[in-house]
Image (cartoon, helix red, strand yellow):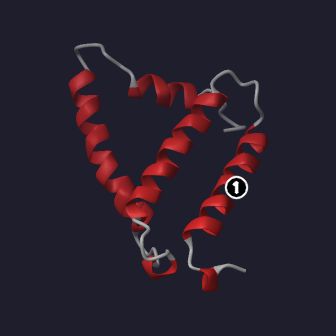
Amino acid sequence: MNRYPAISSFLTSVYYEEHPEVAQEIKTILLRGADVRSQIALDGTDESKFKDDVNPKLVVNILVKFTEGALGSRLDRIRPIEEIMFEFTQCLNLLKNNLYKDEFLK
């Protein structure tokens, strides 16, 4: 994102594209992408680390929405990517500390 700062603006514009020539095709690609993203995100996940009442798919959903928000906050280029990544890491640690079983926390 430092190298190509406009990439987040481009990806966001694709997501909200409504031009009739491409809108349906983009929606189809995005829907397929949701399944692929979920498979990639959950592939190799050790679900036994989560507390018994935690749904790992819901955790992925939270992470996707946070990532989208973080990318959106980068659109104005006011916040440096390092600041966004630091905040993202803090959020990951918060989730881990609250959703993992105690024996998997260091």
Q: How many marks?
A: 1
Identity of the amino acid at label 1?
Answer: Thr
Q: Is residue 37 above or below residue 5?
A: below
| In the foreground, 3 or 26 | 26
What is the quadrant of residue 105 in the picture? bottom right
Looking at the image, which residue is at 78% across and 44% down? 82
Looking at the image, which residue is at 65% across and 68% down? 97
What is the quadrant of residue 73 in the picture? top right
Q: Residue furthest top?
A: 19
| Quadrant of the drawing holding the C terminus | bottom right
Q: Residue furthest front?
A: 53
Q: Residue furthest bottom?
A: 103
> Percent position (x, y) of residue 29?
28, 39
Q: Is residue 80 left or right of residue 5?
A: right
Q: Is residue 84 above or below residue 48?
A: above
Q: Is residue 6 above or below residue 46?
A: above
> Percent position (x, y) of residue 57?
38, 60
- Identify the residue under disc 1: 89
